Structure formats: C-alpha cells, structure tokens
Amino acid sequence: MLRRCVGCGARVEKAHLRRVVLVEGRVEADPAQRRPGRGAYVCDGACARRAVARSGFQRSFRSAVRIDADLVDSV
C-alpha cells in the first residue's frame, strides 16, 4: 500500500515509512504503527524536519498541532 510522505511528498510503500499520530494536539512518533487515530507518514528525520518547516503536519491532521523538539530524533 502506497502512502504519501508529509515532508517530501513522495509516494512510498507503507513499510518503508515512519508513522506519527496526533495525541491531544501533539504530534508523537508511532514506531509500532498501531496507535489509534489518524496518522501521517514521513520517510525519515529529514522529511520530518521538512514537514515541520512546511506545516505539513497541520495540513495532514487538519488542525493546529504542537510539535516537540525531540520529534525529529524520535522518528
């Protein structure tokens, strides 16, 4: 199943992407890809940085989000 990376926009197999979820308005990594709720996908830390800079997470989750400084490291 192909998913679109929020950072670079590439369409990549889901198995090669890292999932993040929105929990109480905060974006968190979901390494097991099993947490409930809407998810967004990034290729790696560089794409996570790009998504933060381009407001990709806000668009993907369709709401204002809080992004912790350690999100990029945890992805």
Image: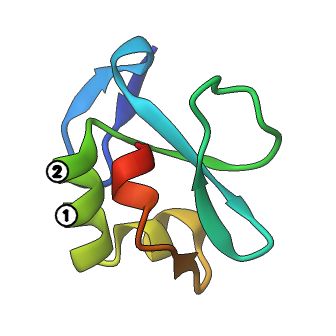
Q: Nearer the viewer, mark 2 or mark 1?
A: 2
Above or below, 32 relative to 70: above
Residue 12 appears at what percent x and percent y?
Answer: 27, 23
Which residue matches tag 1?
50
Q: Amino acid at mark 2?
A: Ala
Amino acid type of the residue that numbered disc 1 sits on in the rendered structure:
Arg
Q: Which residue is mark 2?
A: 46
Q: Are marks 2 and 1 in contact (CB under 8 Å)?
A: yes
Q: Position of residue 59 (x, y in %)?
A: 45, 72
The correct choice, above or below, for 11 with respect to 39 in the image is above
Horizontal side of 75 relative to 27 (left or right) equals left
Q: Is residue 46 left or right of residue 67?
A: left
Q: Is residue 29 visible?
A: yes
SS assignment at label 2: helix
Instruction: Sort mark 1 into few (<14), some (14-19) or many (20+) by Cα contacts within 10 Å.
Output: some
Report the number of numbered marks.
Answer: 2
Which residue corresponds to the image point at 51% horizontal and 37% vertical from the top-left? 19
The image quadrant where one finds the C terminus is top left
For residue 5, which quarter of the picture? top left
- Measuring from the top left, give residue 69's x and y in whole percent: 41, 73
Residue pushed farthest bottom? Answer: 64
Determine whether, in the image, residue 69 is placed left or right of residue 8.
right
Residue at 82% across, 40% down: 36
Q: Is residue 54 visible?
A: no
